[in-house]
């Protein structure tokens, strides 16, 4: 089918588009700002149109020629207190435009919850579903609770709270039951929904196989992430207002996003009948496995946009996710321009470690190696196999080569004892007057002590890494060469 996807720059939409393309569908992405889709790896395979849910003519033009549409629009997260009213208007416009364009089906992802005491957020989610279904186009409304995947706002809130706080004083909502579902399972159900035959409307409640309290989800996250057991102390006095500001203090999630979510945590979100989810996925993913998939990117060194451009799993980060999405990764980045060629620059940084050392303050690296040995680590005693040649998977002192592109790029993964994961990257880029060295040290902290560890070392990093980058550039400029024509351009060893 030819399918219109709204919200393609968002969390769900950005992952749904490749799933639809893989299913053989033709995809048209609707966005108010096409520039937001520029970083998507599938951008060349789709049609992009500019339209606004508050502008009927642009909506109808966007839907022209399409057979179905995904409604993934949500006003929450901005500064507007009337997000529910804006959502109501947008949904009404969409339903009327879909009828005018003769769409066969609208698929909408909403929120779980029952009763007349729903939060403003959940009530608005379900009202949008009713507004869409009031039109002439068949609507399949999916109702889900917490979606587990890197970039999902609910998961990011859970991730950052659990990572940062070994002891948590929490409101009573941590004892509220929830039925989380993997993002991979949600995508399977969304694709199945748009392919549903017939002209009837449906409401499908979907959830994973586990019913857990938020406290159990936090403890489960800590176990999968390798964190010490979290101490969680529920108290009756923390208001949603205070919780919102507390989340804003210890997580990078914007307060405008956190507030409606926190208010929704008082509502139990359990699926009454999970038959649809089970049948459409062929087997649901458990909570702990969903968390493991969401953390996979950090664990396999895919910590930069460069490595997540073509994420193998929808649970992994995408470059177009919000800045606050994904694991917390601390960086020290240095850039140095040099008249040396990119090949000379690569030669210089690919010789790091072993007899050459680390180009600046080698005594600090030797001291770090001694300390690592004392606590049972590998230290510097492994050296390196060859003074210049490197291969993926081999050891360089207390590093392991995790990626190498000859003449351009080198990534080392730390195997020293650390309260987290660390990488050191070097990249040689062509520059108008020679080349540019990009050097990045990255650290994925596990827990509060790991963050304090990085903070303590930051002043030393600023000096050591800055001088190391400059010394690498100087070594590239000073690279000796053999004068013989038979060996022109080849580097002398050392």
Image (cartoon, rainbow, N blue to C red):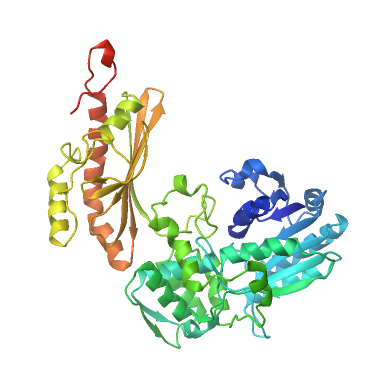
Apparent side of residue 389 relative to residue 49 in the rendered image (left or right): left
Residue 208 % position (x, y): 57, 74
Label tally: 0
Q: Nearer the viewer, residue 462 or 270?
A: 270
- Residue 217 visible in the picture: yes
- Residue 130 visible in the picture: no
Residue at 65% over, 53% down: 17
Q: Nearer the viewer, residue 117 or 187?
A: 187
The C terminus lies in quadrant: top left
Residue at 58% over, 82% down: 267
Residue 72 % position (x, y): 67, 61
Up the image or down, 183 lies above or below 55; here it is below
Quadrant of the rendered image containing residue 195 = bottom right
Residue 271 % position (x, y): 63, 80
Residue 123 % position (x, y): 67, 76
Q: Nearer the viewer, residue 126 or 189?
A: 189
Quadrant of the rendered image containing residue 483 = top left
Up the image or down, 320 lies above or below 480; here it is below
Up the image or down, 203 lies above or below 421; here it is below
Apparent side of residue 308 relative to residue 98 in the rendered image (left or right): left
Up the image or down, 358 lies above or below 183; here it is above
Q: Residue furthest top?
A: 485
Q: Nearer the viewer, residue 49 or 349?
A: 349
């Amino acid at each position: 089918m030819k399918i219109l996807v709204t919200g393609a720059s968002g969390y769900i939409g950005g992952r749904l588009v490749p799933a639809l393309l893989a299913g053989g569908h033709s995809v048209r992405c609707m966005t108010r700002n096409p520039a937001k889709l520029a970083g998507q790896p599938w951008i060349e395979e789709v049609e992009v149109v500019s339209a606004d849910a508050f502008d009927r003519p642009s909506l109808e033009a966007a839907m022209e020629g399409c057979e179905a549409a995904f409604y993934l629009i949500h006003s929450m997260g901005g500064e507007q207190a009337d997000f529910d009213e804006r959502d109501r208007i947008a949904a009404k416009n969409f339903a009327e435009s879909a009828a005018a364009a003769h769409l066969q089906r609208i698929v909408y992802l909403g929120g779980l919850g029952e009763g007349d005491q729903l939060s403003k957020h959940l009530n608005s989610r379900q009202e949008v579903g009713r507004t869409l279904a009031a039109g002439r186009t068949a609507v399949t409304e999916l109702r889900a609770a917490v979606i587990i995947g890197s970039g999902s706002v609910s998961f990011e809130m859970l991730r950052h709270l659990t990572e940062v706080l070994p002891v948590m004083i929490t409101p009573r909502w941590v004892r509220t039951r929830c039925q989380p579902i993997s993002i991979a399972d949600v995508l399977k159900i969304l694709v199945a929904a748009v392919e549903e035959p017939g002209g009837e409307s449906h409401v499908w409640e979907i959830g994973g196989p586990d019913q857990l309290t938020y406290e159990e989800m936090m403890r489960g996250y800590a176990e999968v992430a390798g964190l010490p057991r979290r101490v969680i102390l529920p108290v009756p006095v923390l208001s949603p207002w205070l919780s919102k500001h507390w989340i804003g203090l210890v997580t990078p999630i914007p307060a405008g996003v956190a507030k409606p979510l926190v208010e929704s945590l008082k509502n139990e979100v359990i699926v009454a009948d999970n038959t649809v989810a089970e049948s459409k996925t062929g087997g649901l993913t458990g909570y702990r496995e969903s968390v493991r998939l969401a953390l996979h990117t950090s664990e396999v060194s895919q910590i930069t946009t460069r490595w997540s451009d073509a994420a193998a799993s929808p649970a992994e980060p995408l470059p177009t996710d919000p800045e606050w999405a994904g694991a917390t990764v601390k960086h020290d980045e240095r850039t140095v321009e040099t008249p040396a060629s990119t090949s000379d620059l690569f030669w210089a940084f690919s010789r790091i470690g072993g007899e050459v050392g680390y180009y600046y303050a080698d005594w600090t690296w030797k001291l770090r190696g001694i300390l690592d040995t004392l606590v049972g680590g590998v230290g510097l005693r492994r050296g390196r196999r060859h003074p210049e040649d490197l291969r993926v998977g081999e050891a360089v002192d207390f590093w392991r080569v995790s990626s190498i592109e000859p003449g351009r790029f080198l990534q080392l993964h730390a195997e020293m004892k650390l309260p987290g994961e660390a990488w050191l990257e070097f990249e040689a880029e062509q520059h108008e007057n020679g080349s540019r060295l990009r050097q990045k040290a990255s650290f994925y902290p596990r827990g509060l002590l790991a963050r304090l560890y990085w903070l303590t070392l930051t002043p030393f990093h600023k000096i050591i890494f800055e001088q190391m980058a400059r010394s690498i550039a100087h070594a590239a400029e000073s690279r000796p060469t053999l004068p013989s024509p038979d060996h022109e351009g080849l580097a002398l060893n050392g």
